[in-house]
Image (cartoon, rainbow, N blue to C red):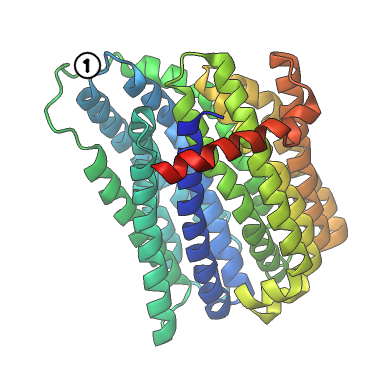
Amino acid sequence: MARSMLVDSLWVLGTRFVQRAANLVVLFFLARALSLAEFGYYGYAVATLLMLSVAFDVGLRQVVAQEIGRPEADMAAVVRDTFLLWMALGLAMTCVMAGVMRLGAPPVEGAAALPAILAALAALPTLLVRMGQGVLLGQGRVKELNASELAGRAALLGGTALLWSLGRLDLAAALGLLLASSLLSAVVLGAQVCPKRPPETPFRAAPMLPWLRRGLAFLTGTLAMIMLGRVGVWVLGGVLSAEELGLYVGAMRLAEMLAEVATAVGIVIFSHGVRQADRKAAVADAVRTARVVTAVMALAAFVGAVCAGPLLALVLGPAYAAAAPAFRVCLIGAVAACQGLMLYPCLSAQGKPWLGAFAFVPATLLAALLAWWLGARYGLMGAAWAFALAQIAAALGFLLLYRLRFGLPVWTSLLPQPEDFAGLARFVPRAKSV
């Protein structure tokens, strides 16, 4: 593993653990302030916001990173063009988000239109953050990328704790805080990427079309990757009761915090990949990183499974302790998800994002089918197994892809090797001397 990648990965892991801790505290307050049905509505809104931000980004985050990574790039022009594209795509996403929340969100007794409006308004800053991150990724500014996200999480945590202590934390307030935290992240990121000098290249609309065409190649795999973990929520919204959906969202979101660490490391893998000329070395670094992080997440999942009941009761409240068996199953899926979340960015960085679709698309279709079938037959446990089995299918798909594309044995890609520990041992003395 390259030393710079290891340093960035450790930095991202550290900041992501801070973010996950903040999320745990936010979930702690929300689960106690909202009913199960309201918590399910909140989870539906967050899942929809994430999916639509990926869809309306149309792969431009990766395209912008590639453009910025070119030695001859005019950064100011790239930032300008990214902002103009965001204005058009953001308005469209806001309209779609409003329609989805109006027509597809699970019904909540007594809920007015305000929660749906707040969720729709969060579309603009959420999309800006996603697209703007491409600039930082292309420059390798991973620490600054995490700083913008930490600012939003800090605001969300502080606001949630304050409103809960005042007894004012309801569904509308929770979604209002989500909007405010997204706005803060967008402002911080905007300050980070704002160029210090005007563009040297005059504006022309023509180059945007190739950007969009290239972005579509990234979109299919990335959208399927996001939908793999979220499609079950939409399908189960028509299969489970509102209370069961709330239990499932709570168990799944808590388990997915492991996979979100892998998502963060995947960002590092992509950022290094777009700037690394030796593709063979980039693949080797990505595989080493993925198997080590997956092993660490498996250990964390084991601890979580042993403490499932008390952990759910502590974080989400006593009502969620009944979801402990489902939570254990979701942990299996979360560990499996780590593979795809780290191996796919390596393919994207090498200009082969469409390869990821061969693993993600079938797994996403499987997730929808299993959620509909197992959720209807077995309720909450069926929903958890649908999530886990689909994630396992995606992981196996990526291991097979790397076997066929790069000739890497499945077990070598999956299990930590002696060289991984040797590399860490060599890094420790150098880290102490810095």
Question: From this viewpoint, which residue is outermost toward the bottom?
Answer: 166
Residue at the spot 56% in from the left edge and 36% down from the top edge: 426
At horizontal 78% and vertical 36% (from top left) the residue drawn is 393
Q: Is residue 10 left or right of residue 177?
A: right
- 407 up-or-down from 163: above or below: above
Quick check: 26 above or below 91?
A: below
Image position of 287 (left or right of 147): right
Q: Is residue 2 left or right of residue 140?
A: right
Residue at left 56%, top 26%? 346
Q: How many marks?
A: 1
At label 1, counting other C-alpha atoms closer than 10 Å, the crowd grade (few under 14, some 14-19, many 20 or more) is few
82 w.r.t. 48: above or below: above
Q: Is residue 238 visible?
A: no
Quarter of the figure with the N terminus? top right
Residue 427 in view: yes
Q: Residue reaching furthest left? A: 197
Picture residue at 59% right of the left edge, 77% below the top = 35
Report x, y in % for residue 356: 64, 26
For disc 1, the marked residue is 204
Horizontal side of 7 relative to 400 (left or right) equals: left
> Image quadrant of residue 132?
top left
Q: Is label 1 in a helix, a strand or a loop?
A: loop
Where residue 3 appears, as percent x and y from the top left, is 49, 32
Q: Quadrant of the C terminus?
A: top left
Q: Residue 416: name its quadrant.
A: top right
Task: Locate residue 431, reporting x and y percent.
Answer: 46, 42
The quarter holding residue 369 reads: top right
Query: Mark 1 belongs to which amino acid?
Result: Arg
Q: Residue furthest right?
A: 377
Percent across and percent down for residue 123 are 40, 49
The image shows residue 39, relative to residue 404, as above or below, that is below
